[in-house]
Amino acid sequence: MEPFLASVMIAATPFLFAALGELVAERAGVLNLGVEGMMLMGAVTAFAVAFTTGSTVLAVVAGAGAGLVMAGIFALVALHLMANQAATGLALTIFGIGASGLIGQGFVGQPLQAPPKLDIPLLSESTALGRIVLGQDALVYLALAMVPAVAWFLARSRAGLVLRAVGDNHDSAHALGFGVIGVRTLAALFGGAMAGLGGAYLSLAYTPMWGENMTAGRGWIALALVVFATWRPWRLLVGAYLFAAVTQLQFYGQGWGLGVPSQALAMAPYLATIAALVIISRDRNLTLANAPACIGRPFRATR
């Protein structure tokens, strides 16, 4: 059971990065469906930098930067030129799939050393809790630290309150003198950087290699996680670990003798995503009470 729980912490990390970034963007009223494409660009960029320079830090920064650039394209087209946000996000995903495959052609099958694990003497190996929690790499703890940071930002900081106001009623926020497009652009860029970090973790630590479409739908699951969590960071943390546990069942289920075909276990994460969305959608009042009122709606400043 210890290896399974430790693997759940690892598997939840890309979900946390990508979903937290999308949560902030959506709270500002930005619906970016390009998470999958941004994760793929972050993954291939981080792997390429790590492979050529040998620096994990530079690779992580490069992965976040790639996601940020992709989000910048989305912000320019969808927010400043006011194209349809859903269509722009889908186009971004398609572009990310193709561009990452092209960039990563020369890196397919190349080995890469994973980032070092945290090692605290007398703690990391002495107890089961230490082996599960204290033996992870730094990005796992960064993802966990981002949860309270985002929760505090949205609930306690002035900038977070402004961001939420823009997402709930952009006309009123504009009337009060807040720059709606500027706030949404920054939120979208943060979401892109976080998606890039999630992709970077996949190619640097989760499976230290590059393969085309290695995100395997995790960007779409991250989008569903935001709805599942009803746009609340702490609920998102719980959801990320639940979905990660379901994801890891396909690797451990056969060894446990569950008697379930491997194909069914491979489908489990996506079936769980559909089931979660169906359950959430049954309580329409809950969704409407927590969803940003202006999500996906274009804003044109009026004098």
Image (cartoon, rainbow, N blue to C red):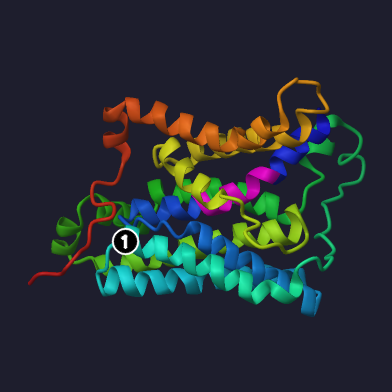
Query: In the picture provided, is 188 more to the left or to the right than 56?
Result: left
Q: Magenta stretch mostly in which secondary structure?
A: helix
| Of residues 64 and 87, the one drawn nearer to the viewer in this rendering | 87
User: In x, y percent, where is residue 149?
Assistant: 52, 51
Displayed quadrant of residue 195: bottom right
Q: Which residue corresponds to mark 1?
A: 85
- Outermost residue on the bottom side: it is 52
Q: Residue 283: say if magenta.
A: no
Asked which secondary structure carries label 1, the reply is helix
- The reply to whether residue 155 is in sight is yes
Q: Which span of residues is magenta-colored?
A: 11-19
Q: Which residue is at 58% across, 68% downward?
A: 41
From the viewer's perspective, is residue 93 above or below residue 117?
A: below
Crowdedness near tag 1: few (<14), some (14–19) or many (≥20) residues, C-alpha within 10 Å: many
| Rendered location of residue 162, percent (x, y) | 30, 57
The answer to which quarter of the image holds residue 6 is top right
The residue drawn where x is 48% and y is 41% is 225
13 magenta-colored = yes
